[in-house]
Image (cartoon, rainbow, N blue to C red):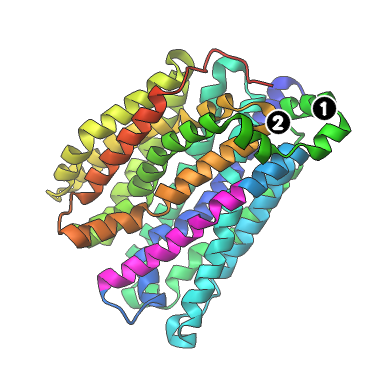
Amino acid sequence: MLTDQQALRRATVASFIGNFVEWFDYAAYGYLAAVIAVVFFPETDKTTGLLAAFAVFAVSFVIRPIGGIVWGHWGDKFGRRSALSLSILIMSGATFLIAFLPSYEQVGVLSPLLLLLVRLVQGFSASGEYAGASAFLAEYAPKNQRGFYTSMVPASTAAGLLLGSLMVTLLHATLTPEQMHQWGWRLPFLLAAPFGLIGRYIRLHLQDTPKFREMEGRLAEKEKDTALPIRQLLTTYRKKVLIACGVVCLNAVAFYMMLSYMPTYLSVELNVSETLSFISSSIALAAYIGFVFFMGYLSDHHGRKTMLVSASVLFIVLAVPLFQILGHGHFWAIVLVQIVFGALLAMNDGTLPSFLAEIFPTPVRYSGFALSFNTGNALMGGTAPLVSTWLISLTGNKLAPAWYLMAIALLALVAMLLSHETFREELPD
């Protein structure tokens, strides 16, 4: 019989490794966007091809709210562990298939259509991952350390992104452009299969959370069979869902802008070499992982609302000045700016999982988290690279992404001001 501490450690490792696996898979596409634009959309100019690649990236987010409802229902009715074990299998399988997709030169328009199909499957499976892992850890963690433990989820996301960044950096440094376009871009996607199998194995050998097991014992069979989590959520907790969506929007835009789009922005818009842009992003990612743990820890002592409001205000104040510094093109200045952006994002990202887990009760926690998180990401996150590229093309102003980020931060600030503090409370039953 495992002690509570042993069970918590296993849950932490399972959530960290599983989420790491998912987001390494997912990040590979973002980091290789410029190459994928040439492979799958060669009959376009550079900007149009990049827009097309990011459009495929964004379309996969359209399915995320639907996936959030499906995975949330599964996790609330049949268990967190069951949902997480299946989501990682689908995600890694779809990503593995990308490595074998034919190029546009081989099969014409069928090539981008197949890419779109696989990306939709990726989006569907990813929609259950972040919410499920966060709810899983929140329900295992002690009340006074919930922020720290749930910060493992965004930290594992960043770790997956870091490995993706390092691998792409290595590929760009060792392969010629011709080799990258012919076969080099496929290599990261091949790792999805072994990573996915490892993550699934770890999750299958876990017990479900104490909170979920308590709920199962409390509810009558008839009630469990008839009560739909999504119906409960939209009739009883509508205001909380709207507040959560507003807060998630900033997390989504900042996350994809800073950690996925930034290498492309540096190389395409500011003419920084691809190798240097990936190196700077990797340094910032490593720093961000440490920031996430620290911010989660701070949220346990100063509150979720304090941290999330502070993050919104700082993004509003600093977005434009930091992008202006990026425009000077000095390598270490770029690294410093990315580290500062990473700290601001971590203030939001390290606090968000515990906040979202705490505002919804156990019977709808997975559904509430998944619906709000995936809706915010569908509306703002997956489109962040596309909107940023389009705004620059439309206005000719390379600061356009900063103004967009400021507007979203203002929305998140309003949402947080309408919320209440949760960090001293027990998870609601």
> Which residue of the protein is positioned furthest toward the right in this rendering?
221
Predominant secondary structure, magenta span: helix
Q: Mark 1–mark 2 contact, CB under 8 Å?
A: yes
At which x and y percent is residue 308?
39, 26
Residue at position x 83%, y 39% in the image: 225
Is residue 425 rendered magenta in the image? no
Residue on which the image places disc 1: 219
Is residue 55 rendered magenta in the image? yes
- Label 1: element kind: loop
- Vertical relation: 79 (above or below) 141: below
> Is 310 in front, or is 283?
310
- Vertical relation: 316 (above or below) 395: above
Residue on which the image places disc 2: 363
Describe residue 236's horizontal placement relative to residue 391 as left or right: right
Magenta residues span 46-68
At which x and y percent is residue 155?
48, 37
The amino acid type found where label 1 is placed reads: Leu
Distance in Å between CA atoms under marks 1 and 2:
10 Å
Residue at position x 46%, y 13% in the image: 301
Image quadrant where one finds the N terminus: top right
Residue 203 in view (yes/no): no
> Is 258 in front, or is 273?
258
The amino acid type found where label 2 is placed reads: Pro
> Is 328 in front, or is 426?
426
At which x and y percent is residue 392?
21, 58
Quadrant of the rendered image containing residue 417:
top left
Which numbered dot is residue 99? none
At which x and y percent is residue 119?
52, 63
Quadrant of the rendered image containing residue 271:
bottom left
